[in-house]
Image: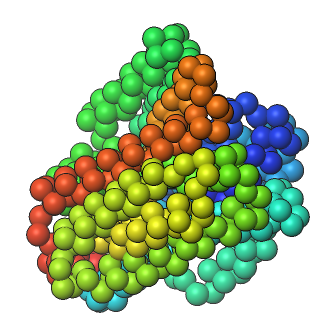
């Protein structure tokens, strides 16, 4: 439910824009309000789960998510929608690290743990694409408001089942251990400032105050966060956490992966509805091949990890997904669905899905009972920050390129298509770059990725 709602708004964005009066740059906040709150608070959420209990934080997060969904579904003005989306993102920051932390600890057998984490990674991708399918069906047959209201019965089922099926789990901590609230605050505000500045760059010059002031303020706050972490007695994320090269490189390249993935779904949806004139229902159903391809890729990637190792699987997945985006960038104003959209979608989905299980396993390389939710929070933070940067930077560049083309006399559909194609090519380049970095910097880890972890978990 939580992962699905990161993208469920994509197909409904044009209807939300018309219904609530969003500007085009402001519309991106319907996506970024969610990913910014989640990205800024996920590490704190992970630490809260380690401190106070992972099951408890999961239940609290689901409850908050349901309430925020009601606010978004009942929105009558842009600010109300953005508030609801920020609330949903904050709820993910509580629930997602707790959930993934529980999975990492419940499966102590190496093979079973690899499968469980592979399923988690696959669900992330399927949620991102099924969100568009569900959004299209509900938006066209009922109302865009139901993409939020449908979360309520799902949340009730979760709140009923989790206490009955999952035992509590928390870290063993000293009496003087405290939470780094200042670090979380500076991280969140810094990310908001940076992305706000990038959003303004879509329709303002890069040297304008509306772009530079928030960018500089955000960068300063992020530097303050680093200083706080260096001096803090109980930092939000101990810098020693990044001493593991495999974990660090995978978390860093996750920024590239999610920037390309989310901007792809965001821009292709707009292309289909604004250039090809697809209905929300048709646009939503059009994502089914991507869901199937991701599912197939997930199964393939999970099966290949024991044979080829983490590095080979995740690197090949990134590079292959980049090729899929380059193929998608060849679309034109009169492209057909099967000839212009589906080939790139299938290639992208198959390879992106194959990379997910390997990347999730690598991101939790060497975690123990003391820091499983923290490690999960770091990985989820990279996913959300990458999502925010993808929409802010790639979509902004696409909008700017289209605006310049219109100013030069190009027809609006042609200009929009050229802008989206540019965004796809940049996303493809980021994916390939991520694959090359993984191939060059990640250690050769296969079973050795899992065995020490399993021993530590069993001992813990």
**Residue 318 position by quadrant:** bottom left
Task: Answer above or below: position of 102 versus 8.
Answer: below
For the N terminus, the image quarter is: bottom right
Q: Nearer the viewer, residue 53 or 297?
A: 297
Using the rendered image of the protein, determine whether residue 429 is visible from the camera's viewpoint. yes
Task: Answer above or below: position of 345 versus 153.
Answer: above
Using the rendered image of the protein, determine whether residue 149 is visible from the camera's viewpoint. no
Query: Residue 407's spot in the image, x, y percent?
Result: 60, 19
Query: Residue 317's spot in the image, x, y percent?
Result: 30, 67
The reply, left or right, for residue 338 in relation to residue 110 is right
For the C terminus, the image quarter is: bottom left
Query: Residue 114's spot in the image, x, y percent?
Result: 32, 82
Query: Residue 99's spot in the image, x, y percent?
Result: 50, 70
Which residue shows up at 68% across the image and 52% down it?
Answer: 276
Which residue shows up at 19% across the image and 52% down it?
Answer: 437
Which residue shows up at 83% across the image and 62% down it?
Answer: 140
């Amino acid at each position: 439910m939580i992962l699905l709602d990161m993208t469920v708004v994509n197909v409904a964005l044009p209807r939300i824009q018309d219904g609530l009066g969003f500007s085009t740059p402001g519309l991106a906040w319907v996506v970024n309000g969610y990913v910014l709150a989640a990205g800024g608070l996920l590490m704190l959420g992970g630490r809260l789960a380690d401190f106070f209990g992972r099951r408890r934080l999961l239940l609290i997060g689901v409850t908050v998510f349901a309430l925020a969904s009601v606010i978004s579904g009942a929105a009558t003005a842009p600010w109300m929608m953005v508030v609801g989306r920020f609330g949903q993102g904050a709820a993910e920051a509580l629930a997602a690290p707790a959930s993934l932390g529980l999975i990492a600890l419940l499966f102590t057998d190496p093979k079973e743990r690899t499968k469980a984490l592979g399923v988690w990674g696959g669900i992330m991708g399927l949620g991102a694409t099924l969100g568009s399918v569900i959004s299209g069906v509900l938006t066209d047959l009922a109302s865009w408001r139901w993409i939020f209201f449908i979360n309520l019965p799902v949340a009730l089922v979760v709140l009923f089942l989790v206490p009955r099926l999952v035992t509590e789990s928390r870290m063993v901590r000293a009496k003087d251990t405290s939470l780094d609230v200042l670090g979380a605050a500076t991280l969140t505000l810094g990310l908001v400032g940076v992305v706000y500045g990038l959003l303004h760059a879509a329709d303002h010059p890069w040297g304008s105050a509306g772009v530079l002031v928030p960018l500089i303020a955000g960068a300063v706050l992020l530097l303050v966060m680093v200083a706080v972490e260096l001096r803090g007695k109980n930092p939000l994320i101990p810098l020693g956490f990044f001493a593991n090269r495999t974990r660090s490189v995978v978390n860093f390249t996750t920024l590239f992966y999610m920037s390309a993935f989310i901007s792809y779904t965001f821009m292709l949806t707009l292309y289909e509805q604004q250039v090809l004139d697809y209905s929300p229902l048709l646009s939503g159903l059009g994502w089914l091949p991507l869901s199937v391809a991701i599912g197939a890729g997930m199964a393939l990637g999970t099966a290949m990890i024991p044979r080829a190792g983490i590095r080979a699987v995740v690197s090949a997945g990134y590079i292959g997904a980049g090729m899929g985006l380059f193929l998608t960038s060849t679309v034109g104003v009169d492209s057909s669905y099967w000839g212009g959209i589906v080939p790139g979608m299938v290639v992208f989905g198959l390879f992106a899905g194959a990379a997910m299980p390997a990347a999730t396993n690598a991101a939790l390389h060497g975690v123990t009972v003391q820091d499983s939710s923290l490690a999960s929070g770091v990985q989820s933070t990279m996913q959300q920050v990458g999502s925010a940067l993808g929409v802010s930077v790639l979509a902004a560049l696409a909008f700017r390129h289209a605006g310049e083309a219109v100013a030069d006399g190009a027809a609006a559909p042609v200009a929009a298509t050229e802008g989206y194609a540019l965004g796809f090519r940049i996303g493809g380049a980021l994916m390939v770059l991520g694959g090359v970095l993984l191939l060059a910097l990640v250690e050769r880890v296969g079973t050795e990725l899992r065995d020490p972890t399993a021993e530590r978990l069993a001992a813990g």
